[in-house]
Image (cartoon, grey):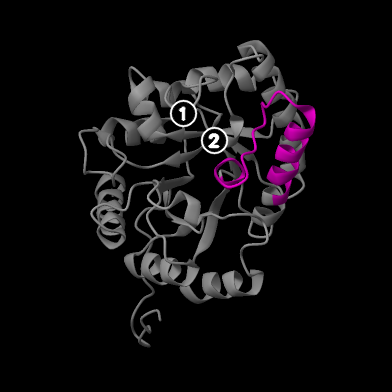
């Protein structure tokens, strides 16, 4: 339970009025061991993240009906949290769906799954994320054809998300996870080819550490397109646990007027509680 506020005690102040902190919780058993901080249910994640001072949680759920709406709304209200975003990766991890699959019926099922996740997140004003569901090109599908399929999907899904007054986040991934778009610049150029303007980029510092020559410069070049940050270190552990220099990155985010979430999509190393604590301490230090 939250600590009571005494009559003459001021409410706790937010650490920073520009950046907001968030932390990931996975409900997908098939992904256990992946880069998510909390794994033991929404109640556990909400209690612990609120106690540390996080503003929000990012939910990785098996599907749109995996979360009890009344339970989640109650937990958010009780702990003063919101939902920063919802992942769609279970569509790939659990159901094997890809937006760039060769078969039209398969792609339609993938788009329908994303729509259902958009509906789920929309109840909490939370954007959905397209990451692993973007798929890859290869075999009978050329890169141009795969990008055409991805463009078709985003042009359908972006306007669908707009009914909830939220964007749809598209995440460039590193070379070991996709062979489509891997840098912020490639993401920006691709967004310019879309008919919808409701797609924003998720800039994940782990992926960027592999693909970008200069992370701060990449963020500045993404001005107007970067809508969400996965806030981690070079080894995909909590910020401060690797060799990444976060200060220029934070300055670049300030320079582009970014006012969204810095969300820990990090390995629970050495354990969830330590990873969460290390993240919030880095957040305080870097954004003070």
Q: Residues within 10 Å of mark 2 (few under 14, many from 20)?
A: many
The spot of residue 276 in percent (x, y) is 31, 57
- Find numbered disc 2 in the image and state the secondary structure of the residue it sits on: helix
Where is 93 relative to 192, above or below?
Answer: below
Q: Residues within 10 Å of mark 1 (few under 14, many from 20)?
A: some
Residue 280, picture quadrant: bottom left
Which residue is nearer to you in this view: 173 or 52?
173
The spot of residue 90 in percent (x, y) is 57, 47
- Find numbered disc 1 in the image and state the secondary structure of the residue it sits on: loop
Q: Do the residues labelled 2 and 1 touch (CB within 8 Å)?
A: yes
Measure the alpha-carbon separation of dots 2 and 1. Answer: 7 Å
Q: Is the magenta stretch mostly helix, strand or loop?
A: helix
Residue 114, numbered label: none
Residue beneath disc 2: 132
The spot of residue 203 in percent (x, y) is 46, 33
At x 70%, y 45%, the residue is 113
Residue beneath disc 1: 177
């Amino acid at each position: 339970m939250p600590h009571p506020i005494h009559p003459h005690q001021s409410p706790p102040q937010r650490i920073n009025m520009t950046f907001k902190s968030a932390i990931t919780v996975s409900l997908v058993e098939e992904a256990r061991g992946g880069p998510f901080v909390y794994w033991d249910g929404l109640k556990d994640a909400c209690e612990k993240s609120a106690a540390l001072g996080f503003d929000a949680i990012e939910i990785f759920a098996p599907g749109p009906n995996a979360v009890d709406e009344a339970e989640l709304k109650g937990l958010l209200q009780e702990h003063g949290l919101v939902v920063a975003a919802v992942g769609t990766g279970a569509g790939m991890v659990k159901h094997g769906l890809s937006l760039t699959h060769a078969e039209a019926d398969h792609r339609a099922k993938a788009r329908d799954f994303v729509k259902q996740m958009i509906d789920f997140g929309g109840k909490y004003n939370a954007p959905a994320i397209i990451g692993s569901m973007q798929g890859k090109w290869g075999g009978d599908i050329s890169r141009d054809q795969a990008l055409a399929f991805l463009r078709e999907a985003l042009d359908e899904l972006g306007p669908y998300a707009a009914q909830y007054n939220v964007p749809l986040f598209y995440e460039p991934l590193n070379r070991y996870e996709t062979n489509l778009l891997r840098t912020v610049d490639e993401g920006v150029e691709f967004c310019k080819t879309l008919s919808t303007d409701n797609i924003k980029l998720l800039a994940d510092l782990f992926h960027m550490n592999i693909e970008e020559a200069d992370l701060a410069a990449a963020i500045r070049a993404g001005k107007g397109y970067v809508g969400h940050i996965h806030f981690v270190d070079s080894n995909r552990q909590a910020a401060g646990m690797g060799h990444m220099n976060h200060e220029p990155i934070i300055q670049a985010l300030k320079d582009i007027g970014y006012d969204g979430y810095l969300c820990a999509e990090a390995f629970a190393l050495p354990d969830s509680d330590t990873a969460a604590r290390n993240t919030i301490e880095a957040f305080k230090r870097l954004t003070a």
